[in-house]
Amino acid sequence: MADSFAMNGGDGPNSYKQNSKYQGERFDEAKVLLRNSIREKLTIHKNSNATTVTPVFKIADLGCSVGPNTFACVRTLIEAVELEFKAQGFETQLPEFQVFFNDHVANDFNTLFKAFPIDRTYLAAGVPGSFNGRLFPKASMNLMHSSFAVQWLTRVPQEVTKEVSPAWNKGRITYARSESSKVEEAYAAQFARDMELSSRQVSRTGGDGLLAILMPCRPEPSSLQSHRS
């Protein structure tokens, strides 16, 4: 939700930092897909004199929380971009990297900043605010990434909260175990609205900046049937 609480901060036993192993493992499994996408899709622009390229490559991790997964993600992104620069003949013109770590304003940015890798090869900045709104200037970002964050909706669909609605969900917070297909349709429609990504698209450079998303999904709606009573 756009106005929801951030993940638990700090590094205690109930913190996200100590309870995000699953997300890290899933990202590791998706690394090859991410690297291949960067290799296939990344466009490197030369400046007007045709001898230099953009000196600063800007990356954003949307929904970074407090680490450590965000640091592993950024390292993977930078390594993939550097490899592509070299593959396209710019091995002597590697850019500087500027990385923006984004999460809700309630995120524990202090814990995040304290955990920055000492050997990082990028300049870092924190960007508080919901990624469902504008965070960056127009055409400013080369690569934006989000793992296990954009599956959250900006709001509960209004249709499921009204008792007179055919999609009323009787106080449940998910469409699983619902008695009406209208509930599932309402959640699907809300997801479609949220995933229009207009705010993120407008921030990408020249229309060819990259946006990478990793989130858990169900293969098909019928997989819910076994959970219904």
Image (cartoon, rainbow, N blue to C red):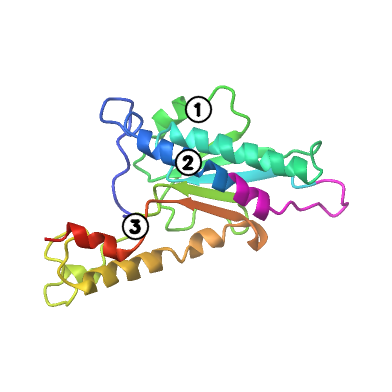
* Amino acid type, callout 2: Glu
Q: Quadrant of the C terminus?
A: bottom left
Label 1 – label 3 distance at C-alpha: 34 Å
Closer to us: 203 or 218 = 218
Task: Decide whether residue 43 is among the magenta residues.
Answer: yes
Residue 136 visible within the image: no
Count of numbered marks: 3
Q: Amino acid at mark 1?
A: Phe
Q: Nearer the viewer, mark 1 or mark 3?
A: 3
- Measured from the top left, where is residue 40 in percent x and y? 66, 53
In the image shown, does 43 or 129 lie closer to the viewer? 43
Q: Quadrant of residue 188?
A: bottom left
CA separation, marks 2 and 3?
17 Å
Q: Residue at x 39, y 39 (%)?
A: 23
| Residue 49 in picture, x, y percent from top left | 88, 52
Residue 29, label in figure: 2
Q: Which residue is painted at 46% across and 66% down in the image?
A: 196
Sooner in the amino-acid sequence: mark 2 or mark 3: 2
Q: Which residue is mark 1?
A: 116
Earlier along the polypeptide chain: callout 2 or callout 1? 2
Query: What is the x, y in percent for residue 44?
Result: 74, 51
Q: In this picture, which residue range is highlighted in magenta?
A: 35-52
Q: Residues within 10 Å of mark 3 (few under 14, many from 20)?
A: few
Q: Is residue 39 left or right of residue 217?
A: right
The numbered dot on residue 218 is 3
Give whichever of 152, 219 is nearer the camera.
219
